Amino acid sequence: MAEPTILPLLRERRSVREYDETHELDAADLGSLLEAARWAPSAGNSQPWAFLVGRRGDAAHRSFVPLLAPSVRRWAPAASALVFTLHQVASGPEQDAPLYSDYAAYDLGQAVAQLCVQAGALGLSCHQFAAFDHAGLAELAAVPPHWSVTTGIAIGLGVVSDIAPRTRRPLTEIAYAARFGEPIAEISYAEGTHRPETDYQ
């Protein structure tokens, strides 16, 4: 069957591992990315997210790079910016402080997704990663104990290379009707999705 139609901005998203080292992320574009994240929905409008930002060449970026795992350090420092995401896990720094929100990590994910879509609209590429020293970053940035360092994002002008087939599980494996495993009759299910992509899947 025909594959469902989605926005080209989403279908053409790439998690590149090569960036144009001459590109600089200016303040206006950085503000646009963070503003997109700021307007994400969240449970009870709790907005349980925060971001640490270093642009290539500034002091923050220089302090972030040594915290990257070798596998990430091979490519991420060339991006125009490194952004690290955090979500709030408790209402305060006290040991017995109640949980801030059961959905804080989910809400951070929505904020990051909006940031990445905005980046695509600006012609930029995002590559999210988790291989870095979380505890080291928390100490370096004096992150309060009721916040959790979560993921990193390399943002810049991507260079697409080493194109390889990429697959996505078909809708029959992820979207169901009243019972788990029961297809939704009205949806046109493609057998699978293959499209050009970088080596990052």
Image: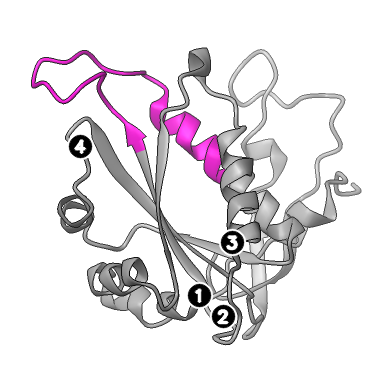
- Residue 178, above or below 103: above
Observer-side mark, 3 or 2, equals 3
How many residues crowd around disc 1 within 10 Å: few (fewer than 14), some, or many (20 or more)? many
- How many numbered badges does the structure rendering display? 4
Which residue type does callout 3 highlight? Ala
How many residues crowd around disc 4 within 10 Å: few (fewer than 14), some, or many (20 or more)? few
Mark 1 or mark 3, earlier in chain: 3
Q: Are marks 3 and 2 in contact (CB under 8 Å)?
A: no
In the image, what residue occupies the spot 28% across and 70% down?
Answer: 68
How many residues crowd around disc 2 within 10 Å: few (fewer than 14), some, or many (20 or more)? many
How many residues crowd around disc 3 within 10 Å: few (fewer than 14), some, or many (20 or more)? few
Residue 98 part of the magenta-drawn span: yes
Q: Marks 3 and 4, Cα distance to the nearest angstrom? A: 26 Å
Q: Position of residue 20 (x, y in %)?
A: 60, 84
Q: Are marks 3 and 4 in contact (CB under 8 Å)?
A: no
Observer-side mark, 3 or 4, equals 3
Quickly name the residue at label 1. Answer: 79
The residue segment tinted magenta is 87-113
Q: Are marks 2 and 4 in contact (CB under 8 Å)?
A: no
Which residue type does callout 2 highlight? Tyr
Quickly name the residue at label 2. Answer: 19
Q: Which mark is residue 144?
A: 4
Q: Are marks 1 and 2 in contact (CB under 8 Å)?
A: yes
Q: Secondary structure at mark 2?
A: loop
Residue 3 part of the magenta-drawn span: no
Taking the image as shown, residue 176 lies to the left or right of residue 27, namely right
Quickly name the residue at label 3. Answer: 27
Which residue type does callout 1 highlight? Ala
Q: Position of residue 83 (x, y in %)?
A: 43, 58
Mark 3 or mark 2, earlier in chain: 2
